[in-house]
Image: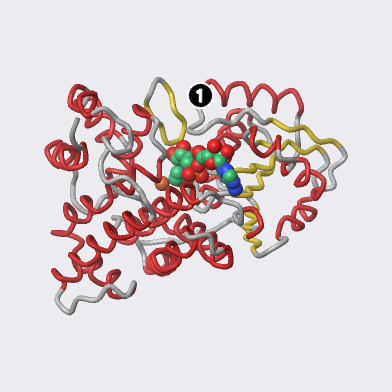
Amino acid sequence: MKEFISGTKIVCGPGAVQALKDANAKKLLVVTDPFFAKNGTAQRIAEAAGAEQVQIFDKVAPDPSVMLVAEGTAEVKEFCPDVIVALGGGSAMDCAKAMLHFAGGQIRLVAIPTTSGSGSEVTDFAILTHKKVKHPLIDSRLRPELAILDDELVAGLPPSLVADGGFDVLSHALEAYVAQNATPFTDAFAKDAFCCAFGALPASFAGKTEVRGKVHIAATMAGMAFTQAGLGVCHALSHSLGGMFHVPHGRLNAILLPGVVGLNATAAGEKYAKLARAAGLGGSVDTIAVRNLKNGLIRLRRELKLPETLAQAGVDPREVWHRSGEIVDAALKDPCCRTNPVQVEDFMLRQILEEVTGRV
Ligand SMILES: NC(=O)c1ccc[n+]([C@@H]2O[C@H](COP(=O)([O-])OP(=O)(O)OC[C@H]3O[C@@H](n4cnc5c(N)ncnc54)[C@H](O)[C@@H]3O)[C@@H](O)[C@H]2O)c1
Ligand SMILES: [Fe+2]
């Protein structure tokens, strides 16, 4: 038996933040990072909500820690908001989700993503970091009630964030498409998200803001797919490496994804081939289409000026060799392994790690 649930109302397009009024907030807490507090966006969003009382928690840092969430949870308990607005990338949204989870009560959550990447605005996940390990918190109550996708908030994204987020979208879509819990519904979202992001990312990276709305929607669609279908070994390793070395999440996925396609092709070759053809990469025979998919990802990664190895991303290969046991153990424990199309074994993770480490 399979099911598909999507409980988040989505409002999109330029000026979509105006939909915040419909949340009828009385006491509003905005959870964001210092960047959006300093440039006035957090205040502008708060005004759009028209709440009687507003407080801004602006301490979010990339890959939110359990300590940060504890500090934020204390603020939620003291202020007692009826609505929390998460404004920012995956880190701000995950931090807000976790604060709400640990504070308890009946607080409503609105997510306003400012990167096109994590899809956290529609997922049941919040990724928290504790002692250099990333822990996914998974609960359907973490899914925001409302997601606002406003093109204007991603118009000014710097190219490096377009690239990092873009490869997060591609990896969500690609992993969800072949995941153990995929359904025809998640397949439709995953395939469309992949094709849209794959086609539009070069223009978005080059600064063509008119395509950014498309990629923004693709990010949310990929989130809708993976929150139901699950992810795979790319995310398991990305979480493990991200906790340890603090490299941006999407950048790690870009390094890992082509190798993961090679690894899973034995079980997922037919679906990879379908995806390759849908994305215009061709290949009349499945094995050729899978190769085209892998090479297409490598070409796009180069075009978006992303690193090919951990060494190029600033991680010392000696550290990776030294800590490979810890990296593999953490990845094996990650719930994303459970939905990978091929059963994940220790040696497979070591093989991918070896491929992506790079040279001193
Ligand atoms: N919950 C989920 O379902 C899920 C899924 C995938 C990833 N994640 C998590 O999300 C996090 C990554 O999120 P992310 O890639 O969105 O990055 P991020 O939220 O960590 O933000 C990265 C940087 O971008 C800046 N930034 C954000 N929006 C900007 C804008 N419009 N203009 C200029 N700067 C901007 C932020 O200030 C920050 O410094 C990771 O911790 C990852 O584990 C969560
Ligand atoms: Fe991700």
- Amino acid at pointer 1: Val
Q: Which quarter of the figure has residue 100?
A: top right
In the image, residue 178 sits, relative to residue 348, either above or below, namely below
Left or right, 146 with respect to 135, comes to right
Q: Residue, x 38% and y 68% (percent of image)?
A: 191
Q: Report the coloring of the rendering.
A: secondary structure
- The quadrant in which the C terminus is found is top left
Residue at far right of view? 52
Residue at far bottom of view? 284
In the image, residue 192 sits, relative to residue 245, either above or below, namely below
In the image, residue 258 sits, relative to residue 272, either above or below, namely above
Left or right, 184 with respect to 45, comes to left
Q: Residue, x 15% and y 38% (percent of image)?
A: 354
The residue closer to the viewer here, 263 or 215, is 215
Q: Is mark 1 within 8 Å of ligand 1?
A: no
Q: Position of residue 315 (x, y in %)?
A: 30, 30
Give the residue at mark 1.
Answer: 66
Q: Position of residue 338 (x, y in %)?
A: 28, 44
Left or right, 25 with respect to 168, comes to right
- The quadrant in which the N terminus is found is bottom left
Q: Position of residue 35 (x, y in %)?
A: 64, 36
Q: Position of residue 154 (x, y in %)?
A: 59, 54
The residue closer to the viewer here, 207 or 330, is 207
The residue closer to the viewer here, 197 or 328, is 197
Q: Secondary structure at mark 1?
A: helix
Q: Residue, x 42% and y 38% (percent of image)?
A: 248
Left or right, 296 with respect to 60, comes to left
Q: Residue, x 35% and y 53% (percent of image)?
A: 171
Q: Which quarter of the figure has residue 291?
A: bottom left
